[in-house]
Amino acid sequence: MPAFLHRLGRLAFRRRRRMLALWLALVAAAVVCMTAFGGTGKLDNTFSIPGSESQRALDRMKTDFPTFSGTSAQIVFTATDGQKVTDPADSTRIRAALGAAASAPQVAKVVSPFDAHTISADGTTAVAQVRYEVPQSALEPNALDALKSAVSGANQQGMRVDVGGSAFGNAPSESHRSDIIGVGVALVILTLTFGSLLTAGIPVVTALFGVATAIFGALSLTGTVSISSTAQSLALMIGLAVGIDYALFIVSRHRFHLAHGMEPEESAALAVGTAGSAVVFAGLTVVIAMTGLTVVGIPYLTAMGLAAAGAVLIAVLVATTLLPAILGFAGTRLTPGPGSRAMRREQAVGGAGEDAVGATGDSLASATGENVLSGTGDNVAGGTGESVAGGTGEHVASRTGEHVAGAAANAAERWFRLVTRRPLLTLVAVVASLGALAWPAHDMRLALPDNGTAPTSSSQRIAFDRVGEKLGPGFNGPLLVLADTSHSSDPATAAQRVAATIGALPDVATVGKPVANPATHTALIQVIPDSAPSDPATKTLVNSIRDDRAAILRDTGATVQVTGSTAVSVDVAAKLNSALIPFAAVVIGLSLLLLLLVFRSLVVPLKAAAGFVLSIAATLGAVVGVFQLGHLGSLIGVDTTGPVSSFLPIILLAVLFGLAMDYEVFLVSRMRESYLHTGNPLGAVHSGARHSGRVVTAAALIMTSVFAAFLTSDSTMLKQIAFALAAGVLLDAFVIRMTFVPAVLALTRHAAWWLPKWLERRLPDLDIEGDRLGPAPAAPESVALTPSTAD
């Protein structure tokens, strides 16, 4: 793979105008397809789980009870100034508003609160039901706004009207502000990293190319497949983050080559062949993990996984094709200026403590293969203090036996030296702190988001709170029981007995009168729980009704199925819970296998898997602490607590796995390379920090910033995902990869890189770092060589 990517990078550099034109054409084609076949107006935010009991019942209701099979809205009338909704003037206004609502677009039926007896005990609140025959995703873009306008006439002195209900749940959220914030922060971090606005702008430009292609391409499919607004936002979030990070890794390697005198064309090709190989490897792990979400069998989650996988795949293609083309346009302008801080830093990395490192990380060797090293471990320079290894080709280490003296160490290396000074103490501190952070996760409650977590100023949130306060929390999530009475001798009596049996169960507030369809011998029974839709007691009630189906069949001859939005949420959570452990096992097993192939070590994969589990557990604990327990939630706009989104744990597993692999590969591959050259395990750990620590730090900060920018979203699900990914990357990069990893490697020393001979012979050599690509770049002019090594 490195050889192929090397040729691809050179070709893109030489044919840069054609490559740029090709990508511009791809973006234009995606825009045209989106306009012609899809668009944001066709996004589908409906939760469904094919094959589940709730979904089978909903499918049957489309023919037996079409007015109940679609989504629904609530119109909440609240009398103020001491009045009651039953007062003649107020009731007249309510009836007029309901008549106007019945003529709103796509409305199938309006149920008056006076007929359904949905009036609060104090007479101040009345709730009307608006039923549609289509799901939320099939509502016209202006249908809900039209409903609000239709009933606004009742919103006068002495009366307040709020519209909510499941039709408003999981509404699309705008994320353009998040995009701008994320890109702006990334540009600042890149500028500080490279010390050049031109260099900083290149990763941002290429990432935007990739995101535009991915998002417009995904939106072009909305006319034929179901894609949610959350899937679009997730693809945007991940595509932007990895697009910038992947380009950062390659541009950083390219600039290192330029600083050491390599020609731009060869530098770009070699950067794509080396860092690009790691990018391809890391990107494919994300793609595999995200694509693996399809096996869960939930269309909503499948769309999220495929959209994110497509965005990452396009980011990899951009990094290996468009990026070297843009590097060709930049030419030598990316070379740090002589005497600049950036040049001194690049030369320090290249010479500090190891031999002047080339593009492949090999030591600067003479024609006879001897290595040149300064006696102090600083940059190889002329003048005093030079030391050249003899004909044996051995490396000359500093007095401490490590690669670099403290004066030459950058911030990342100084941190690695600190955490490896007492590695066992570091490990204890990391495990204890992450364990404490993970503790709240043991009490995690999972559910789909509802209007109870919508913004407090929104109409649906006000309606939700008002209904829960005046009529009871169960009115916000009624259950629907579909009874098949075709085998009963008296269908009407059987339906009534089913309703009575359910009404006797714990946590049931009221049971509605069965609505029968004599033609199909079915009846629909509405059950109002005592508890809120996301309350564990409601889940228990759903399961209790299902557990009693055998007794109901024996007593009445009727079979029952429980459905409705609350039952769908219960089924989705159960499906995801059952898939979580197997999916986690596959992800962790895959990480062990891939890292075993890359690093040819037993300790490195086991250490990476342990660190991954720690970071996942700590992240879930942080999510529970903020969103479920309310700790510090106000800082990110969380004004009410509630359960964690059912989709979050499995999405976090898939995404964080791939991102953690990024940092593991880029950081540890440098350590392995140094260890193979020097045989010094502790020095290799410090060398990895010196070469990759700054770039990994910048990449993690960029990715965290991009994810954190989406915390401004109004969607609770997207806000939770953004927080989890931002916290996960922060913990994994800085606590696990930059602290836990070096401590483990320092503690295990030589054993960290051991692999049984029989296993080593059977494993393929992936050569992720491209060691076999060719000779290292020429040494910088500041490196003085003796005549014997300069020939």
Image (tube, rainbow, N blue to C red):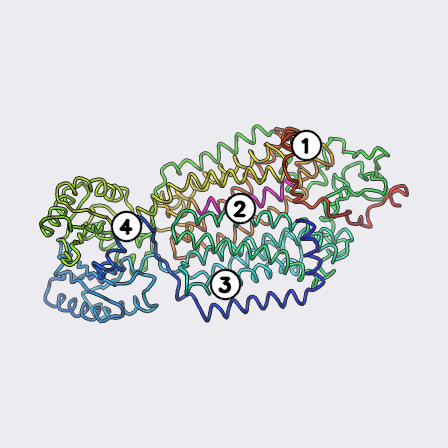
- Please state which of the two labelled residues, at mark 3 or mark 1, is closer to the viewer: 3
Amino acid type assigned to the residue bearing label 2 in the image: Gly
Amino acid type assigned to the residue bearing label 1 in the image: Pro
- Please state which of the two labelled residues, at mark 4 or mark 2, is closer to the viewer: 4
* Disc 2: CA contacts within 10 A as few (<14), some (14-19) or many (>=20): many
Find the distance from the CA under tag 4 to the CA under tag 2.
Answer: 34 Å
Q: Name the residue under label 4.
A: 54
Q: Mark 3 points at which residue?
A: 217
Q: Where is residue 576 in the image (x, y as percent from the top left)?
A: 38, 44
Q: Earlier in the sequence, mark 3 or mark 4?
A: 4
Q: Mark 1 points at which residue?
A: 681
Q: Is mark 3 on a helix, strand or loop?
A: helix
Find the distance from the CA under tag 3 to the CA under tag 4.
Answer: 33 Å
**4 and 2 marks in contact (CB < 8 Å):** no
- Please state which of the two labelled residues, at mark 1 or mark 4, is closer to the viewer: 4
Q: Which of marks 3 and 1 is nearer the N terminus?
A: 3
326 and 419: which is toward the camera: 326
Indicate the quadrant where residue 145 lies. bottom left
Find the distance from the CA under tag 3 to the CA under tag 1.
Answer: 47 Å
318 and 343: which is toward the camera: 318
Find the distance from the CA under tag 1 to the CA under tag 4.
Answer: 58 Å
Amino acid type assigned to the residue bearing label 4 in the image: Ser
Q: What element carries label 2?
A: helix
Q: Is mark 4 on a helix, strand or loop?
A: helix
Q: Earlier in the sequence, mark 1 or mark 4?
A: 4
Q: Name the residue under label 2.
A: 658
